[in-house]
Amino acid sequence: MFEIFTRLANWLAYDLVGLNPDTKLGSSLHFFIEDTSKILFLLIVMIYLIALARASLNLERVRAYIQQKHRVMGYVFGSGFGAITPFCSCSSIPLFLGFTSAGIPLGITMAFLFTSPIINEVAVIMLWSLLGWKFTLAYIVIGMVVGIIGGMILDAVKGERWLKDFAAKAYQAAASETREHEVDVPEAPKLTLAERHQFAKDELREIVGRIWKWVLIGVGLGAALHGFVPDGWFAENLGSGQWWSVPAAVFAGLPLYSNATGVIPVMESLIVKGLPVGTTLAFCMATVAASFPEFIMLKQVMTYRLLAMIFVILLANFMVVGWIINGIGPWLFAGF
């Protein structure tokens, strides 16, 4: 499906502009065009479809159903839903906005947002074929655990207090309405197709108008680093397996931008070149789930305080995961 964006980038960067694909500038421009076009397409389609669904579904009932379950099951639900949605972090943000507007607890919403960029079905298939079933299973479990723990922490500190005003008001209004109807949640009003289309179009215009510039800035930063960071640098400088290599790999991955599908071949090459498995995993998870471009986009819906808390939670999780996997890696991935 997304091959069209690769072809568009090939035509614009290499045929029209005339850059060589083997040059740093050519690689960076190709990355920028392909990812920007794909992300904006996903944003437009997903925001419209989610808004269309929200206009016709009683999301209060969905939220009430989740809240009636044990909260831990809610985190598992959110993380599991994130695992089956094949989106990068930035294209998961429209779903995050939809959950927030429905009043679903922030911890469950963040469990989804943490997990969604790390795991998807394409990534699972690629991991299975490249690194084996043990690594694949460990990757899925780790990705979901990161989401669940992150969600639990944010609920424990009442992180919804630090949403931006428009998101906080939507969340509080939806949550208050649910509390008023805890026993008997009313049916959602039936809207015509034209009314649902108008609702979705208005929401699309509002959200895209707010975040499109941040998409360009974020992907532009990632594209520059993608094209100009020397190949082999990470394996050469972080391959010793010392304790500090894990946090160093995490911080090295932060400025980069990729999705799980794009980073998996990098993961394979780093392991083959001698980078410890835990260090590689920490680097790749930081790249797809805690990158600066993602936080630039999340800034549109969260205050700096909440962003800082999420940043610390993710970094701590990735470092602990890296150290644990480095410790058990020789046993877990024996024969790789």
Image (cartoon, grey):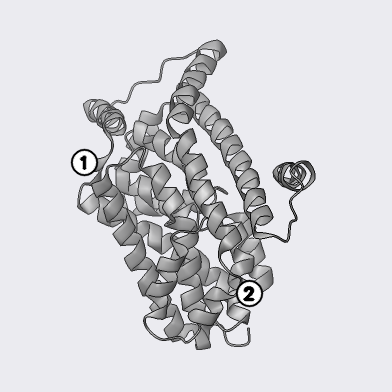
Residue 241 picture location, percent across and down: 45, 86
The foreground one among 171 and 141 is: 171
Task: Please determine whether, in this image, residue 49 is positioned above or below residue 305.
Answer: above
Report which quarter residue 8 is drawn in.
top right
Determine the secondary structure under disc 1.
helix
- The answer to whether one can see residue 276 in this image is no
Give the alpha-carbon distance from disc 1 to disc 2, as whole Å: 42 Å
Q: What amino acid is labelled 1 in the image?
A: Arg
Residue 266 picture location, percent across and down: 61, 68
Which residue is located at x 45 percent, y 70 percent?
282
Residue 247 picture location, percent across and down: 38, 73
Task: Please determine whether, in this image, residue 330 is positioned above or below residue 295.
Answer: below
Which disc, if any, is residue 269?
2
The foreground one among 171 and 209 is: 209
Which disc, if any, is residue 228?
none
Q: What amino acid is labelled 2 in the image?
A: Ser
Residue tagged 1: 161
